[in-house]
Image (cartoon, rainbow, N blue to C red):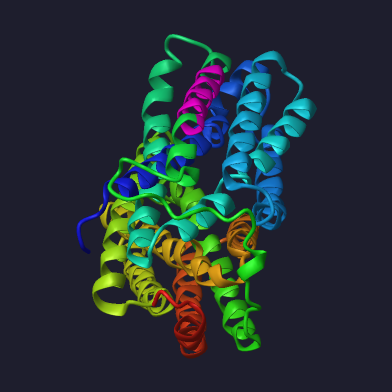
Amino acid sequence: MTKVKGRVRAISWLLSLVYFSSYVMRINFTVLLVKVCSELGKEKGELAVIVTALTVTYGIGQIVCGVLGDKIKPRIMISCGIALAAVCNISFFFTSSVSLMTVIWGINGFAHAMFWPPIVRLMSLNLTDAEYSYASVRVTWGSSIATILLYLLCPVLLLFMSWRVIMLLCATVGLAIMVVWLIFAPKLFESKSSNLDTPPPKMQKTDAKNAQKAPKYVILPLILIMIAIVIQGALRDGVTTWMPSYLHEVFSLPEEFSIFITVILAIFSMISFSVFDFVNRRFFKDEIASSVFIFVLASVFGVLLYFSNIFSLAIPSVLFMSLLVACMHGSNLMLIAIAPKRFKGTGKVATYSGIMNACTYVGAAASIYIFSAIADWGATIIIWAIIAILASIICFAAIKKWRKFRIEFDKEN
């Protein structure tokens, strides 16, 4: 990649900071769940409904906010999302009712749905294809860094303060980032001049004026891609969710080890974003073709994990599970961060982004129940490998028409 301009770097890191704030105020309750259960005298299963509420409203909100994201200025939507998420986090300081917490966290899920679609729209309107790829990696880093910090810092902070105070701290971080966003976003996205190398492109009030209708032949590859995204979500969140249980049941590793595992997965995901972005730009130059390669690689790691399970090898099992999840983060980058950008010409980038991202959470929700219903770990691992291969076949079937769509419709390629 050629030298990145100062303005592009500024946009990338500002959006990364915004996405960082989303994760800080979204997964914090999950990180603190064990402590919350202890203080409220509840079983983990009794509070699972709170986390489920966020997952459901976040998934539905992706579609709703995707549509709204093409009608409302992205800067306004992101500001509203941060503010509403902060209010929800602050509200937890004042309640112990599980029912009320469920409602509040459901609202929080919708608040976080206001982040991704407008972020994709901003990047597609302001960056070239190469710059977009650079920015996408940095933005996704924000989620990994937030995950690492929360899982490392929260256990330490709990030695000195209650979980409620930590929720307030997370809200404070979110509000501080909102201030940064409100100061710099107008300068980067809507000003007519900039001292960061080049002025930003003029933001259109709406995209409808110059919008084109997506060709009908893209419907089939889009459906195939959405099915692959569902599988990606099932593997990414399913393996991540059940990894600690697998290691505890099969290798008798302590449950506390799950915190360490979560950090390892986040580190692997950060690395995978950069690695697969490089692989895509260097060898494939096509996000769907790259996804075929990534899913095949994931199936290989699934097979290696199966044999590690047979021979009861703990360290290789941790490694191959981590690599499998890393592959799913790579496919997430290709299918959810990069692919929606191709619809820029329709004036509905946020809409497509929201719909495609929602597919991840359909897969994630299904995986929690499906994988838990399979009694044998060996069978579960084989299923992981099989559906990864299935996703690669599905993506392969979409390549030809998707490439035609890119050449004819996405003029930047």
Q: Is residue 86 among the parts visible in the rendering?
A: yes
In the image, taking residue 260 as reference, residue 84 lies left or right, namely right
In the image, taking residue 166 as reference, residue 197 lies left or right, namely left
Q: Residue at x 46, y 73 (%)?
A: 388
In the image, taking residue 281 as reference, residue 391 lies left or right, namely right
Task: Please name whichever residue, 49 or 135, is drawn nearer the observer in this view of the structure.
Answer: 135
Return the x and y of residue 346 as percentages of the image width and height.
61, 71
Q: Is residue 152 magenta?
A: no
Q: Residue at x 51, y 24 (%)?
A: 170
Q: Is residue 254 among the parts visible in the rendering?
A: no
Q: Is residue 174 magenta?
A: yes
Task: Please name whichever residue, 39 or 82, is drawn nearer the observer in this view of the structure.
Answer: 82
Return the x and y of residue 124 as percentages of the image width and height.
48, 60
Return the x and y of residue 290 as percentages of the image width and height.
37, 75
What span is in magenta?
A: 167-182
Q: Residue at x 72, y 17 (%)?
A: 95
Tally the marks.
Answer: 0
